Image (spheres, grey):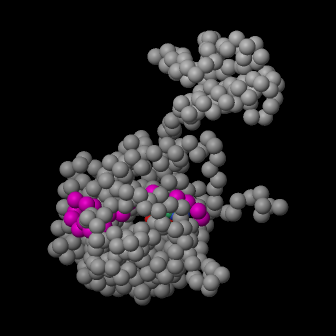
Amino acid sequence: MELITKAPKGTQDVLPGQSEKWQAIEKVLREEAALYGFSEVRTPVFEHTELFQRSVGETTDVVQKEMYTFQDKGGRSITLRPEGTAGAVRAFLEHGLFSAAMPQKLWYETSCYRYEKMQKGRLREFHQFGVEMFGAADPFADAEVISIASSIFQRLGVKNLKLEINSIGCPTCRAAYTQALKEYFGQYHDELCDTCRERLEKNPMRLLDCKVPRCHEIGEGAPSILDYLDDDCKAHFEAVKAALDSLGIAYTVNDRIVRGLDYYTRTVFEFTTEDLGSQATVCGGGRYDGLVAEMGGQPTPALGFGMGLERLLLLMEAQGIAFPPARPCDLYIGSIGEAARRKAFALAGAMRQSGVAATFDEVGRGVKAQMKYADKIGARFSMVLGDDELAAGKAQIKNMQTGEKHEIVLDETFAKQFAAIDSSLLS
Ligand code: ATP
Ligand code: MG
């Protein structure tokens, strides 16, 4: 029975009470994306496994340990998307968005799937809001993308977030750096975890974001990428910082940030908090100038970020941030008898067409129980129709909060009269 009545580990239902909070956050995300000139892209929940292997990278935790991969009935290897960028880049290439005006600016809100050890703020199905900008190599683009996340947090009222930035250079600077890391970590070969020993050969930079405590500790003494940046990458990083300064966005440089995915180049950044325990990163992103070409397109500079929405919501709750209340029922239309109920049903329909959230007695119960229900759902006004009201063509509208009553005529001006009663109370 448990398999039927318990959702799979690492998933979460969003119930009424909670879904309104999601909607409030989503509204801000959409509005901010539009203000910055980004358009929404929706891509499939599953893609060919190769897409993620190629873009996220074979040596990453995501690809090595966390993907939901299976064979479909046609024998293809399919993977549930573990993040949003790969699908967006695939769509960008598949539909020739590169021939439209550059930069192309896309946003998405998607569910993501990673087989992880479940913890607070760490789920197997979670949601990301992300933006991607294609065709902009300039440092102002980096600062702009960071500023989108920053203004989202600001508008939502989120506090105690720290922006950490780093540059991980381009493949040229990384060649020397990788060599230095190999030499450094090589000295600790026997103390590293199995995965890191493998990474040492294939992709030493990945060692810097290993979560095994001893690997992490060793990583603290590793050489800094910032000492290996070539002149162009150095200048780019300086310009990003200057642009952030000009916007008044505070940041700290943290040369240990390498990001968990392989495709990043130059600028990488994270927004972290101490209010969420060990699941500290709420938003992470950066530049991935090599990815589009890596996936078979023309070389196209690009950048973006992914924001974990469950973590964002947890953080807002932890900080006691108020959410707008759910839309209440404006008018509950109770009824006594079948004729009145038919009238209430029709009236409710007409009211909704005028933008009023109206409810009638959907279950056919006594008037006392109807009023109790109206109270429970927090109806702002109520009204009861019976044979007398139908005969007189009039009824009483009751303000559920004050108990105050207003007469209302049951004719085609009903909605107008209701609006007048409603707004007189609002002012
Ligand atoms: P972490 O270091 O916490 O594992 P990550 O580096 O794997 O994060 P990204 O791949 O950069 O994370 O994903 C972007 C954002 O998505 C993260 O900053 C986080 O807010 C969120 N996120 C990632 N994995 C999960 C998860 N399993 N559950 C909930 N949110 C997640
Ligand atoms: Mg992770």
The picture places residue 348, in percent across and down from the top left corner, at 64, 30
Which of the 4 image quadrants contains residue 374? Answer: top right
Q: Quadrant of residue 338?
A: top right
Direction bottom: furthest residue: 201
Q: Say whether residue 360 is visible.
A: no
Q: For the point 24% across and 54% down, which residue is it?
A: 244
Answer above or below: position of 366 versus 226. above
- Which residue appears at 61% of the width and 24% of the height? 380
* Residue at the image position 37 percent from the left and 44 percent from the top: 154
Does 158 appear above or below 244? above
Position of 178 compared to 416: left or right? left
Write the start and end of the magenta stretch as one range. 124-142
Does residue 139 belong to the magenta stretch? yes
Q: Residue at x 28, y 56 (%)?
A: 144
**Whole-percent x, y for residue 241 in the image:** 23, 58
- Who is closer to the viewer here, 52 or 161? 52
276 vs 218, nearest the viewer: 276
The quarter of the image holding the N terminus is bottom right
Q: Is residue 35 within the magenta segment?
A: no
